Amino acid sequence: MATALDPHAAIAAKAGGLDDGVLRTADGQRLDRALARSSRAARRRAFFLVAPLLAFIVITFIIPIGQMLYRSVHNDGFSANMPQISAWFAENPVGTDPGEDAYAALSADLLASAEARTIGVVGTRINYEMSGTRSLFTSTGRQVRRGIEPPYREALLGINDDWGDPELWGAMRNVSTPYTDGFYLASIDRTRNAEGKIVQVEEHRRVYIMLFLRTLWLSALITGLTFLLGFPVAHLLATLPMRRSNLLMILVLLPFWTSLLVRTTSWMVLLQQQGVVNDILVWLGVIDDQGRLQMIYNQMGTIIAMTHILLPFMILPLYSVMRTINPSYVRAARSLGATSWTAFRRVYFPQTLPGLGAGALLVFILAVGYYITPALVGGSSGQLISNMIAEHMTGTLNWSMAAALAAILLGGVLILYWIYDRLVGIDNLKLG
Amino acid sequence: MALPSYASPLERIWHWSYLVICGLIFFFLIAPIIIIIPLSFNAEPYFTFTDAMLEFRPEGYSLQWYDELMTFGMGQPEAPRDASWLADMWANAKWVNAAKNSIIIGICSTLLATVLGTLAALGLSRPEMPFRRIIMATLISPMIVPLIITATGLFFFYSSACVPQGSWAYRLFGVFLSNSGCVANTYLGVILAHATLGIPFVIITVTATLIGFDQSLNRAAASLGAGPRRTFFKITMPLILPGIISGALFAFVTSFDEVVVVLFIAGPEQQTVPRQMWTGIREQISPAILAVATLLVLFSIALLTTVELLRRRSERIRGVTPS
């Protein structure tokens, strides 16, 4: 024990009758191991408390979202029902002219698929790539069932000229594998042409990039508006005496606690052409009865209603940061000769930045994913990308497309969430 | 916020205009919520104040839209209001049914979210919790991920989450599943989804309460011979109860106000109040919507009051002077 620095350890080691230079617990076990074991047990206990919820969230949330992401790259509507022509595409590189063998494979598949009544699925799948082709498949399927003779090329071209269209063959090649990036390409208004090159879709079908940009732009605008409206209010609440500010705080918290649909409804009621706001403007003589303003069912409706709905999410983080700002800094700046504007700009405002960042990120994240409010008050010019996802889910039933759009939106939101966690920390998220 | 006595005239002007601006913003926040209350008593099917209402003539006001809430969708709404009328209302009136569904789904999902969320928050607040940050981020994510994405994912998941009829699983869980044995279009599905959405709120509020919790109280209880369970129910739980309750209220409101997921995964059986409102607004908007909205505003006032009282109580318990 010549090297023992801790006299107690030396005594303990002597008392235990063990003299190998290792610290031991009273019952003679190695101290480092006992410590490791007990901290392992503590970690396990903590984890066991979290485990049920973690399992729950994984099953009811993470797996469904993962499944959705899978669906955005996987669609075997064509390849599973048209195996022979899919095999032909796999064997022959892009640019091969479809010969008699290709047409024979196609006819056999069309026949099998029409017999199995899956030709509708096949047609729908190819229709996503090239609109207007669904009926080509279903009608040809009907004719093929009545029987066709070789040569198949002439037979199919005899049924419909479109079977010679290189565009159609390009589209069939695109869908001949179960895994596809086609829906992601479509989400950015791109497609593969007959030569397999990525090109923009026709001008009148370019909607998605425009919608993504509009979503970003409107969300940024709404974030800016909530900042402009929220900052003075948060500042007032933070500087008033506690009793009065708590009273005013109710005016912020009540909208926060009020149902989203109630608030959207009241904006519909207020802003419609025969609504209260227009009535007041007519009564004041600002506008005449014929010139009632269209303030809803357009972008303006979306902007007004969403600004109102998201404003508390800006005020609350700003307020909680502003409460902690020491007023003597501003006083010191003033006493050193700064004007009140300079003192605000150089001393006060920089200190509010953490709250501003938290609020702005939160509002932006929430705005990007909004669905209900734009759907109700947005008209056609106030729709966001969420509305397009819903449209594909319930309207066109192009679920893979909905999944691809949702995946892109999800990616964006997760990046913002990661930034939020970095800058603010989710632990610091405050409610009410 | 008081103006110092040496303030220049310009500063005075700015100060007062600042207060006016703040007043206008407060008006913007609160006016849309308040305005629908008088409008819901409109005698005419309009969404604006009639002359009779503005002159406070009694014939301008009526309770007809509240009456419609109780009768909408009934077999014989005009029948004399006796026991059979009440039974008819209880069974058939659409808004009454929607309210029943909302409450059932809300309570079940809140219970689930609160129990699981509180346990997890207890674990997460222990200093020895491994991978704390990433687990926390995962558990909070249902709040951040846009509802439309959650709804899309759940739609695919629930319609594929089926058990074959006649299997042991169907015999065991069949009552919770739809006729085809799937989770889609069932109360179970909606409850699970709403619990998922409510969990982040429980975790956030309970974790916030636990930050101020003095761990030495637990050690004291243990040193006096209490087991972990006894310590939890006698010491920890009463102290963090305000946080748990306000988390539960948040979860309940989330469920009570949720429409996107319900639209995607619920069947006609699971009509909730927000979904009924959504249908009502989309198809032909009747002032009955305003009556519902008014009731919901009163409901949120009650909730706000409860949460505020809980917050003060929690601060008092923790020794912070209530403000």
Image (cartoon, rainbow, N blue to C red):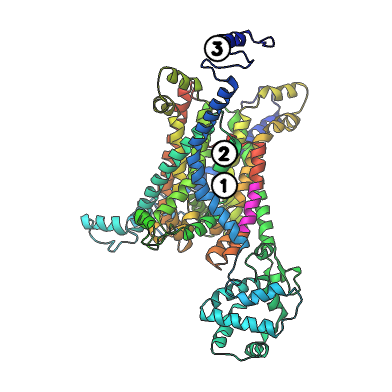
Q: Which mark is residue A308?
A: 1
Q: Is residue B102 left or right of residue A106?
A: left
Query: Contact, CB < 8 Å: mark 2 with mark 3?
Result: no
Q: Chain of mark 3?
A: A
Task: Answer with the quarter of the image where residue A429 lies.
Answer: top right
Q: Position of residue B100 (x, y in %)?
A: 35, 51
Label 2 – label 1 distance at C-alpha? 30 Å
Q: Is residue A408 magenta?
A: yes
What residue is shown at x 71% (from left), y 27% (from top)? B8
Helix, strand or loop under label 2: helix
What residue is shown at x 48% (from left), y 45% (from top)? A56
B87 in relation to B236, above or below: below
Q: Amino acid at mark 2?
A: Met
Do discs 1 and 3 belong to a common subunit?
A: yes
Can residue B185 be seen?
yes
Q: Amino acid at mark 3?
A: Gly
Residue underneath mark 2: B136
Q: Which of B171 and B202 lies nearest the eye of the viewer?
A: B171
Labels 1 and 3: the sequence-earlier one: 3
Q: Position of residue A76 (x, y in %)?
A: 59, 68
Residue underneath mark 3: A16
Predominant SS along the magenta part: helix
Do discs 2 and 3 belong to a common subunit?
A: no
Q: Mark 1 against mark 3, which lies toward the viewer?
A: 3
Q: Amino acid at mark 1?
A: His
In magenta, the rendered stretch is A405-414
Do discs 2 and 1 belong to a common subunit?
A: no
Q: Is residue B235 left or right of residue A179?
A: left
Helix, strand or loop under label 3: helix
Q: Residues within 10 Å of mark 1 (few under 14, many from 20)?
A: many
